[in-house]
Amino acid sequence: MLQSFDEANKFGKEFVDSGLKSFAAISKSAQAIAVEATEYTKKSFETGTATFEKVMSSGSLEKALEIQTDYAKQAYEGFVAEATKMSELYADLAKEAYKPFESVVAKAK
């Protein structure tokens, strides 16, 4: 019985240690996601502002529509690229959060 208690205690300690490692990985990944989102938002705002200025100074409706069309195309392509990058960051977050528990789960089986 004493051996079972010691094993349970050891398992509990490993689980808590794994939880702390997982929390650290989540914090690091969440920070990377926040930085990426902030950079994308800043870049998007700057591009939108520059496009607005170009449209206002274009001088003709045709030129303004051309500028707006180019902007829409670039904004869409940028969004798709950013969405792909963010999905990879979230997938990495999940992998890193689970990694410390792999050995604990394997021992439990």
Image (cartoon, rainbow, N blue to C red):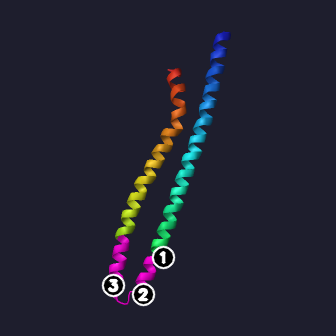
Residue occupying image coordinates x 60% and y 28% = 15
Earlier along the polypeptide chain: callout 1 or callout 3? 1
SS for dot 1: helix
Position of residue 50 measured from the top left corner of the image (x, y, whole percent): 46, 77
Earlier along the polypeptide chain: callout 1 or callout 2? 1
What is the quadrant of residue 52 in the picture?
bottom left
Residue occupying image coordinates x 39% and y 58% = 81
Residue 15 left/right relative to 95: right
Which quarter of the image is occupied by the N terminus?
top right
Instruction: Report the residue that reaches farthest toward the bottom.
Output: 59
Position of residue 80 measured from the top left corner of the image (x, y, whole percent): 38, 59
The residue pinned by badge 2 equals: 57
For marks 1 and 3, give the CA distance: 17 Å
Instruction: Report the residue that reaches farthest toward the right.
Output: 2
Looking at the rendered structure, the kind of residue marked 2 is Ser
What is the quadrant of residue 17 in the picture?
top right
For marks 1 and 2, give the CA distance: 12 Å
Q: Which disc number belongs to residue 82?
A: none
Q: Are marks 1 and 2 in contact (CB under 8 Å)?
A: no
Looking at the rendered structure, the kind of residue marked 3 is Lys
The residue pinned by badge 3 equals: 63
Position of residue 13 measured from the top left corner of the image (x, y, whole percent): 65, 25
Residue 61 left/right relative to 29: left
Residue occupying image coordinates x 43% and y 50% = 87
Q: Which disc number belongs to residue 49?
A: 1
SS for dot 3: helix
Q: Was residue 54 drawn as part of the magenta stretch in this picture?
A: yes
Residue range (magenta): 50-72
Q: Was residue 24 drawn as part of the magenta stretch in this picture?
A: no
